[in-house]
Amino acid sequence: MAEEIKKNIILLGDAAVGKTSLIRRYVLDQFDERYVTTIGSKVTKKEVEVPNGGNPIKMTMMIWDIIGQKEYELTQTLSMRNIDGALLVSDATRRESMDSLQAYWVPKIVQTRGQIPMVFLSNKSDLESEKKFSLGDLEDTVMRVGFDNKPVCYETSARTGCNIDAAFHTLAGALIGRMSSGSEGIPIQEIIRNSEAKSLAGVVDFIIADFADQYGGIEVATPIVKHQMAVAGLDLSNPTLASVTKFIDCMANVEKTFKPAPDVSSNKQTRLQKLSDL
């Protein structure tokens, strides 16, 4: 009987690089051209058998898809806290998405989780005439982060399925024999409470992270957050003062169902203060 293990894997990269489409292709073998901003975190399960000498291992991969807009840094940090491995995704038609891996995403995951196994993807490889960088460019860019060994990089396409299985299975193989561990460093509550919101998106980020941390984590909180954002008419890509203010009221109404009134009032005032400090 194969040994059974579970690993948390995250896809990181700028908005619209194709992370959600890659997961859909890998898990469901489907492709959808529609672009939908991921709210908070979405977790998908995939079971694979990973070769391990003569003793194959049955791995349950919990695949985390998180928001890629950099204004939502707290939500991203909360989602990374117990991750075992990462696929870092760039869009072959946008060079800036490759540069972001070096400047933002790799430092972010290393700061939060340390040197976990990583695989790097240049996605949308089917758009040959629109490419702005090569696989060699991606390798060179990632090497500048300071990896000891040459990074593992693939050109992928959610449309055609090119190299998607290979990328996920390479990462799964790298996770064999590695112990899962909890996050270390500064407690997330301290990070959230001491954060400074510099924009309306930053205030929304604070509200989501603050609520999720108190509710039991970003995974269980996301459906509630998503619904209340719809009630408030809040667009993550373009939040307005009116929608953020209403979102604060909506989240307070939710918290009334499971928190004492003084705590609900305190949370609401803290969030309103973040808004007034802009």
Image: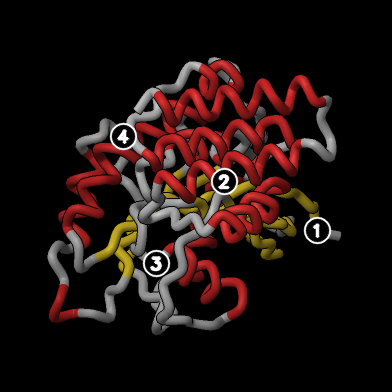
Between 173 and 207, the one lying in front of the other is 207
Residue type marked 3: Gly
The image quadrant where one finds the N terminus is: bottom right
Badge 4 marks a residue whose secondary structure is loop
In this view, the residue in front, 141 or 107, is 107
Q: Amino acid at mark 2?
A: Phe
- 4 or 2: mark nearer the eye: 2
State which quadrant residue 122 falls in. Answer: bottom left
Classed neighbour count for the residue bearing mark 3: other residues with Cα under 10 Å, few (<14), some (14–19), many (≥20): many
Q: Amino acid at mark 1?
A: Ala
* 19 w.r.t. 220: above or below: below
Real-space CA distance between mark 3 and mark 4, rounded to the nearest whole angstrom:
25 Å
116 lies above or below 140: above
Tell me if residue 87 can be seen.
no
Query: Quadrant of the rendered structure where residue 35 is?
Result: bottom left
Label ID, residue 147: 4
- Residue at image mark 3: 18
Q: Which badge, 3 or 4, comes first in the chain's sequence?
A: 3
Which one is in front in this view, the residue at disc 2 or the one at disc 1? 2
